[in-house]
Image (spheres, rainbow, N blue to C red):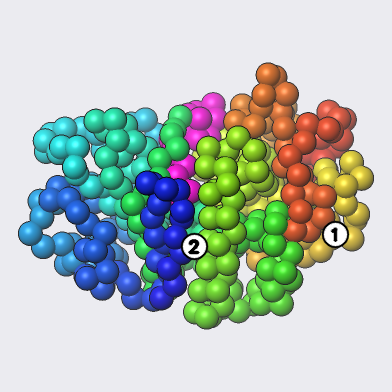
């Protein structure tokens, strides 16, 4: 088992990475200090792992809320269901929320914890690869709005994260591949050596080799933590973690959070960011081709969904948290392993990139 500490002074917490941790009651209970617990999960995960968590809980008053599965349920209605259950059960300010699921459940539960009685503890137990390497750590919590993804939320850190690699065995292939997009992102934005490792070991990751997955998860977490501890509230360098996300979120919004998984949209978005970087002279065509090759090996989309139009992409990109005083800043590449945040691009170049990916 690996343990990574997110060092944020009084808000510091551990990330545990390893196999079969969820059956280790002593390890889980070490992080549980409340007598009131609400487990929030979804219809897909509950039959698989809810009983494992319940078996670890003894002598506490716990309840379970099972939500529908899907990005479109990361909504104000689902948030209200969590808050309502907490109030109905008279949970107090010392309660603990446990997020058992992927990024949707983690974001929802974390935001509910941030809101309820002005803040209660929550724990992340991510069950998807994408959540284990990205959304479960760092404290970004949010819900979607029909006009924009993650537009309602808060920075709110968990008390612990348990990334159990064993649960990835039940993950559908498409979900596993979507998680690879966020792993590739870390190599692109700040860790060229890791990117080269991914090029050499992508087949092992797709085949679910446990050693390769564990290494990729640990390296991804180390990269994210290194950024988060420098810039917890995204006033600067943390925005580089959004490589591909401005394009990806625009795609997700245009599809009403259906059709594509988040990681699929991000994968396409990263290639779009690379293409725009090339058009602006930051990188060369050879680097774009290299990135495309790795994304294709990871079986991620490299063209925008056929039902999306140019105008939708441009309008949706305006609703982005990296916009400042009407100017949209983008995360682009100055090299593989070196991301930059810039507004130094032309609308013509941006339009050319989007049109190219519309096919």
Q: Which residue is mark 1?
A: 287
The main secondary structure of the magenta stretch is strand
39 relative to 230 in the view: left or right: left
User: Which residue is at 53% across, 49% downward?
Assistant: 229
Q: Earlier in the sequence, mark 1 or mark 2?
A: 2
The answer to which quarter of the image holds residue 54 is bottom left
Distance of label 1 from label 2 (alpha carbons)? 26 Å
Check contact, mark 1 vs mark 2: CB within 8 A: no
78 relative to 117 in the view: left or right: right
Label 2 secondary element: helix
Q: Is residue 150 magenta?
A: yes
Residue 218: x and y, percent? 52, 68
Q: Is residue 351 visible?
A: no
Of residues 199 and 227, the one nearer the viewer is 227
Q: Quadrant of the N terminus?
A: bottom left
Label 1 secondary element: helix
Q: Which residues are magenta?
A: 137-151
Q: Quadrant of the C terminus?
A: top right
User: Which residue is at 37% across, 63% downward?
Assistant: 162
Quick one: label 2, few (<14), some, or many (20+) residues within 10 Å? many
Q: Is residue 260 magenta?
A: no
């Amino acid at each position: 088992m690996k343990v990574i500490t997110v060092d944020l002074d009084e808000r510091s917490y551990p990330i545990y990475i390893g196999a079969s941790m969820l059956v280790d009651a002593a390890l889980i209970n070490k992080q549980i200090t409340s007598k009131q617990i609400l487990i929030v999960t979804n219809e897909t995960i509950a039959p698989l792992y809810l009983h494992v968590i319940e078996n670890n809980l003894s002598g506490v008053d716990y309840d379970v809320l099972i939500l529908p599965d899907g990005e479109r349920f990361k909504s104000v209605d689902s948030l209200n269901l969590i808050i309502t259950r907490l109030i109905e059960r008279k949970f107090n300010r010392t309660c603990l929320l446990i997020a058992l699921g992927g990024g949707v459940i983690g974001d929802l539960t974390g935001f509910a914890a941030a809101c309820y009685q002005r803040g209660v503890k929550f724990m992340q137990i991510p069950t998807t690869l994408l959540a284990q390497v990205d959304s479960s750590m760092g404290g970004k919590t949010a819900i979607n709005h029909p006009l924009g993804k993650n537009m309602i939320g808060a920075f709110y850190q968990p008390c612990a994260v348990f990334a159990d690699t064993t649960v990835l065995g039940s993950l559908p292939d498409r979900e596993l591949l979507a998680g690879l997009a966020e792993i590739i992102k870390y190599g692109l934005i700040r860790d060229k050596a890791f990117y080269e490792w991914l090029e050499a070991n992508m087949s092992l990751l797709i085949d679910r080799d446990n050693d390769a997955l564990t290494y990729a998860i640990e390296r991804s977490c180390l990269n994210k933590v290194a950024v988060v501890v420098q810039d917890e509230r995204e006033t600067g360098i943390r925005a580089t973690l959004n490589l591909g996300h401005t394009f990806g979120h625009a795609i997700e919004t245009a599809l009403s959070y259906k059709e594509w998984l988040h990681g699929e949209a991000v994968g396409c978005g990263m290639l779009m960011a690379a293409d725009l970087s090339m058009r602006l002279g930051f990188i060369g065509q050879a680097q774009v081709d290299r990135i495309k090759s790795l994304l294709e090996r990871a079986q991620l989309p490299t063209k925008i969904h056929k039902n999306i139009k140019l105008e939708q992409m441009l309008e949706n990109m305006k609703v982005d948290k990296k916009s400042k005083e009407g100017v949209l800043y983008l995360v682009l590449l100055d090299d593989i392993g070196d991301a930059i945040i810039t507004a130094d691009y032309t609308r013509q170049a941006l339009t050319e990139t989007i049109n190219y990916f519309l096919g």
